[in-house]
Image: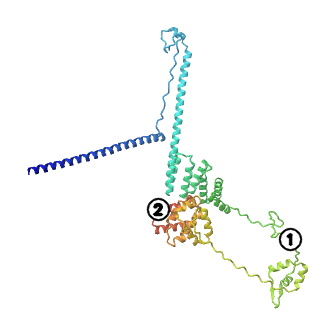
Amino acid sequence: NDNKSYLSTMATAAEKSFQLQMQMRRNTEEMSEFLKEMSEWTSDVKRKDETLKADNDTDAAIIPPIRSQPKPRKKAKRVKPVNEKDDEGGKKKDSKISGYDYRAWDKFDVDAALKQVDGEGEKVVNEEQEEGSTDEEEYSKMEEERRQHQAVYFKEKGNDFFKKGKWEDAVECYTKGLQHDSLNAVLFANRAMALLKLKKYAAAVVDCDCSIELDDSYTKAYLRRATAHLKLDHKREALDDFKKVLEFEPENKLAVSTVKKLEVELEPVEEYKPRQPGDITNMKRVKPLSDKPMRRIHVEEVSLEEYTKFNLGLNKNNVIEIIESDEFVKLAASLDKTDFESLKAAPFAAPPSKPDPAPVKKVQYQDLPTQVPANSLQFNADVRRLKNTPEKLFEYIKKIDPDVYPKLFQQSLEADQLFMFLDILEKFYIPNNLPIYHELYYLTKVNRFSMAIMFKTKHQDQTINTLMKYLLRHSDAGKDAINNLIRSYGTSL
């Protein structure tokens, strides 16, 4: 029994010793892993610290100094007087002469010493003035750069507000940018665009005037001023601005179409003045209808009785028939006086019957295009072919995925095309309960959408209201998304 108890005790001790060794080994591994992670963390912190120091140094070099900070001034360097050398030893003399050295005082040149002192003083003053002017130039240059950075910051912030449809916030940001850089033509033009969205057309014209005065080749300023003039019904001024745009961009489709339209509307109507007898001024020479040589026809006046007898005749059934006037004129023009006299006594035969009109050929419309358009030129050609068949035009537009609208139109979206889309959505999509959110949304992503939507009429505004009300009732899009869409289309429900 003692041996068994001893053996069990030894086995228990060996097991505990083994467990203790395993625990120590695990503790050692955990400690090594912890130290390794600590070392990696330390090196990572050092690396980030060095990166932050480098960024701070770069930012400190770019950021201009704080306003109202005292200007650093450099200390003026004082010019030490050059002591004269002795003729004998070549050593520097003491600049101070002893009061008892009368011989030195006899040799001392007072005028030369005064000139030397005055020259040193002027030199010090000039150096201080040069250093001061250099500091002021550097400070003014840094201040100008700081103002320009602030103007760019507010311009970008205003652009973000404009894209979100927050026109008033955009106007405020552009105004703050102009406070920092009042000679920036882009800021004036951008604020004019936001004012157009707010329907403040007169203020938009003033901002465009300022932008053009600063940069007379800025095309967008002319376009926005022309749009504001159209809204104010200043058609003559709008026409002048659109013509100015064509001087810089001859292929601008919006300007070309609007100029043609305004020229027709503004074409002066000449007042009718009856021509007096004998007045041959401004008479146009009539071009003959035929190239054959003309011949003179003798015309003789006849009485009403003779004219009636001439125009009436008896046919074989002794029935009076009236000759058609056109046939009579043709026949009379081909006869001379002798034939005319003989014609009065002879009865007229019935005029020849007119030939049956040729059958009218019905125009067959071309079939619906099978391919989706790859660019705006192909789209315009297809729309021209299908414009007289709205049903086929609806089927054609339905085949185009809305997300390709920006790529399809790029810079060529015209106001007529935009309103054609909206008309199709109202007349065909809504009656068929088709979704229209993506169509309306991706139209706003086309580059020239904001310019094209400005030319909407009252009727087209009603169409947009109908589409937005349909969206609010049937669309799965969120209310915020629909409200952003309403702001983009410039309407209010």
Question: How far apart are the alpha carbons under marks 1 and 2?
Answer: 77 Å
Q: In the rendering, at what x and y percent does residue 391 appear? A: 57, 72
Residue 279 or 24: which is nearer the viewer? 24
In which image quadrant can residue 227 be found? Answer: bottom right
Of all residues, the one furthest to the front in this rendering is 3
Q: Position of residue 483 (x, y in %)?
A: 47, 62
Determine whether the residue tagged by mark 1 lies in a helix, strand or loop.
loop
Residue 112 in which image quadrant: top right
Q: How is the image coloured?
A: rainbow
Image location (x, y in percent) of residue 372 = 56, 66
Q: Viewed as shown, does residue 232 lie left or right of 58?
A: right
Mark 2 crowd level (few <14, some 14–19, many ≥20, 10 Å Cα): few
Q: Which mark is residue 481?
A: 2
Amino acid type of the residue that numbered disc 1 sits on in the rendered structure: Met
> Which sits in the foreground, 307 or 336?
336
Q: Characterize the local packing of mark 1: few (<14), some (14-19) or many (20 or more) Cα atoms within 10 angstroms.
A: few
Visible residue check, residue 273:
yes
- Residue 272: image location, x then y, percent: 75, 66
Say which mark, if any, is on residue 294: 1
